[in-house]
Image (cartoon, rainbow, N blue to C red):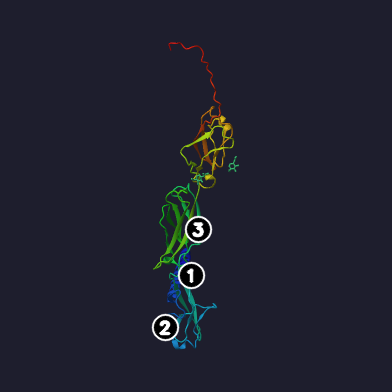
Amino acid sequence: MAMEQRKCEAGRVNRRWVCLVIAVLLWSVASAQIRYSISEEVMEGTAVGNVAKDLGLDKSTLKDRKYRIVSSAADPLFHVNQNDGILYVSRKMDREEICERSSTCLLNLKTVLENPLEIHYIGVEVLDINDHSPSFPEIQKTLEISESVVSGKSFQLQAARDPDNGPFSVQHYKLNQNDHFRLEVKDKGEDGKIPILIVKKTLDREAAESHSLVLIAVDGGKPPKSGEMNILVNVLDINDNAPVFSEDVYSVMLNENAPVGTTVTQVNATDLDDGPNGEVVYSFSNSVNRRLFKLFEINQSTGEIIVKGPIDYEHKDKYEIEIQASDKGLAHLTTEKNVVIKIVDVNDNAPEIEVTSFSSSIPEDS
Ligand SMILES: *[C@@H]1O[C@H](CO)[C@@H](O)[C@H](O)[C@H]1NC(C)=O
Ligand SMILES: *[C@@H]1O[C@H](CO)[C@@H](O)[C@H](O)[C@H]1NC(C)=O
């Protein structure tokens, strides 16, 4: 009818009056039609309305005049009883199945009587009940979020769907209490409400590798129905930790003349990061005197310092070697540490005998 009026307004002035008459006629026909409403999911055999009475038909003639609903459906939703003139539900109805997503579910039934032929239309509105719970497309979702994200960063999630209409559709979302994330909801009108996860507090993989969240969608029924989705947030590592040596000071004693291959000591550094960002390699630092490279070496994977050349106490009784531990991150982080090696003298030099000649005489008055 709104269409009809719009077409009318577009028309010329002399046509307007005719249009108006048509509109009024259409309206009166529409309003004359009887209309019932019935909740979805009611039992088979539930009475919808007294059609005969409401149409002003003589109940006793219904059988002879073969009063019936004209329907092409193999499995009709309604039937009229020719004895009492009442419209009954023939089978249980799911509003969402009959009318899908439309907001009002109005069915138009055409009924006929014969001798003489009479046609009456009956409107039946199928009312929504809260017979569905919200549900998410996935029950379990995994998100990978780098620990470098700043707070305020948002991640759009999939909306929950509820086939029920209006107030019985998804009304709001809840997120379990947690320190790092909060929830925002974007209302996209027809497309429903979209949950958005917001980083509330920056993530630190070394403090927590993952976070388990539960997102709950709630509809507006009384009592409300809900559906939930588990979200596992895996925190992706960035190289934000440098290796740390297990000791503050490494100080060892080494006998001079220790054979080549002797392990002097073993340093150990660990890095909290993940994967290559946390793998440590050892080396002498750039500041180490080249001469020392001839005497000692370090195993880059184990951190063992090994004798490589002859160590001589008489030459030097103490060595200080700066070791570095680096991770294998793209921009690798390095930590230095001094290792002090004290050389212990072993008696490897034959005593030199000093021969002094005591000559001459001793004065007699000494
Ligand atoms: C190095 O230190 C870590 C942490 O204390 C320990 O798990 C590891 O076994 C140590 N490695 C060596 C070679 O001592
Ligand atoms: C370092 O130590 C490991 C384990 O003992 C060994 O397999 C490797 O050959 C050593 N590397 C060098 C360069 O000696």
Separation of disc 1 and disc 2 at Cα? 31 Å
Determine which residue is flagged by label 1: 96
The first of marks 3 and 1 along the sequence is: 1
Q: Is residue 255 above or below residue 131?
A: above
Identity, as a three-letter code, of the amino acid under mark 3: Lys
Q: How many marks?
A: 3
Q: Is residue 261 left or right of residue 92?
A: right
Identity, as a three-letter code, of the amino acid under mark 2: Lys
Question: Looking at this view, is 61 or 45 the one in front?
Answer: 45
> Residue 70: percent from the left, percent from the top?
52, 80
What residue occupies the far left of the structure in this picture? Answer: 222
> Residue 164: percent from the left, percent from the top?
45, 67
Question: Looking at this view, is 224 or 234 the one in front?
Answer: 234
Marks 3 & 2, CB-CB < 8 Å contact: no
Determine which residue is flagged by label 2: 53
Q: Which mark is residue 305?
A: none
Determine which residue is flagged by label 3: 141
* Element assignment for label 3: strand
Graded by Cα atoms within 10 Å as few (under 14), some (14 to 19) or many (20 or more), the crowding at tag 1 reads: many
Identity, as a three-letter code, of the amino acid under mark 1: Glu
Q: Is residue 211 visible?
A: yes
Question: Looking at this view, is 355 or 93 the one in front?
Answer: 355
Label 3 near ligand 1 (CB < 8 Å): no
Judged by depth in the image, the label closer to the viewer, 3 or 2, is 3
Judged by depth in the image, the label closer to the viewer, 1 or 2, is 1
The first of marks 1 and 2 along the sequence is: 2
Graded by Cα atoms within 10 Å as few (under 14), some (14 to 19) or many (20 or more), the crowding at tag 3 reads: some
Q: Is residue 28 above or below residue 197?
A: below
